[in-house]
Image (tube, rainbow, N blue to C red):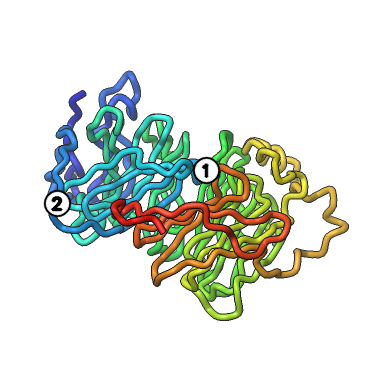
Amino acid sequence: MPTSSASCESSPSPWPLYIVNSSPRFSDSNSSMHRQPLEPCHPDPNPNLDIQKPFSISRSSDPQTLVHLSFFMDHRFFAAGTSHGFRVFSCDPFRELFSREFKDGGFAAVQMHLRSSILALVGGGPHSKFPLHKVIFWDERQSYWASEISFRSEVRSIRLRYDRIVVVLEHKIYVYTFNHLRLVHQLETIANPEGLCAVSQLDGSLVLACIGLRNGQVRVEHYAAKRTKFIMAHDSKIACLELSQDGLFLATASSKGTLVRIFSTLDATLLQEVRRGTDQADIYSLAFSSTAQWLAVTSDKGTVHVFNLKVNPGLEGGDEPQNASDADVAVTKLSSPLSFIQGLLPKYFASQRSFAQFHLPGDTQYIAGFGHQKNTIAVLGMDGSFYRCQFDSENGGEMTELEYHNFLNPEEAAS
């Protein structure tokens, strides 16, 4: 269906900025275009985007390089932003679901909303497909550009869940409803060039975690309960953070990369501390299992570490996580999931070494997520590598490699 095309409307300084080019999927049924002021911006000097134009595949002769990797939907799928487009895969079974390749630019952020086949994209790489201050929405099912949001500064990252779109800039975070692209919240942060942010994924209320206004500080928003918690997680800069699927638990790592700390998001209590190693490292990813029984950590040391967590005794290994709305009840009652044994526990579980490990080849960046099958881990590398491995939940130790693929160059023989 045709849409209007505009990127930033000029007016007396400062210029207002609007959500524009909304298709019926994003706009109110009683309006052809929903416009929501955001923040001042200068007019786009190159307003050449025609989002009515279908996505035509035009392959480049240059070799593809990876710009971005991210898991979504409970680690069951992942997206790769490349120098010439984007690709979406399922993890188990491993297969490519679809891809789009062309020769005029790439993407540095790719997130997908599987309930509607909408992708949120941010340009990037050696030659960006779109200006870096725009979030572009692509409808894979109908094969057309659906909408865009423009900002004054570059978009650092994006997060999607079934009901919200979160856009992270270097000093601000914007939260929108998914159905109407309505701005519902904005937060200020300390400088956040990596776009650090995490959101809960279960149906129910949204929990959001981001860096605060001081080095080492994390801000947690429980939206349904309308409560904000500030956690001084580390003395040094936050390098990585992640929420459990229900938003009840927060894992953080600092720029030192030796310790990972797990907090209750309900009352900011430090619940456990795990030790990756003694030498400094860059932490690339943190991931909770669905029950928050396990935590996976990757770093520049080339090892995936899995830690056995003791923060959620109410769930056994095979149980399903609680609905996120349960968090609201807990916040309202000012009680945490550990309240019934708080008097018996120390302030936190003493730091411990990893329970299981998987050693990776090469000098590249890896991220990890828990697989759909029990005790499995999916590992993605910026060299195009995909590993699926399994750990022994009783004895730990070195994990077993189950499969390997190179999704960037599929013709490479599996190891």
Residue displayed at 52% across by 67% down: 359
Query: Is 403 drawn above or below residue 206 in the view shown?
Result: below
Q: Is residue 232 visible?
A: no
Give the camera-side residue of 150 and 43.
150
The residue that label 1 is drawn on is 74
Mark 2 is surrounded, within 10 Å at the Cα level, by few (under 14), some (14 to 19) or many (20 or more) other residues, namely some
Label 1 element class: loop
Residue displayed at 83% across by 55% down: 342
Which percent across, then down, holds residue 300? 46, 71
Which percent across, then down, holds residue 302? 48, 70
Residue displayed at 17% across by 35% down: 5
Residue most extreme to the bottom: 279
Which percent across, then down, holds residue 63? 20, 58
> Which amino acid, mark 1?
Asp
Give the spatial CA distance, label 2 vs label 1: 33 Å
Mark 1 is surrounded, within 10 Å at the Cα level, by few (under 14), some (14 to 19) or many (20 or more) other residues, namely some
Q: Is residue 365 visible?
A: yes
> Which amino acid, mark 2?
Ser
Which percent across, then down, holds residue 250? 61, 55
368 sits to left or right of 312: left
Which of the marked residues, 2 or 1, is nearer the chain's N terminus?
A: 2
The residue that label 2 is drawn on is 60
Give the camera-side residue of 415 and 185.
415
Give the camera-side residue of 301 and 204.
301
Residue most extreme to the right: 344
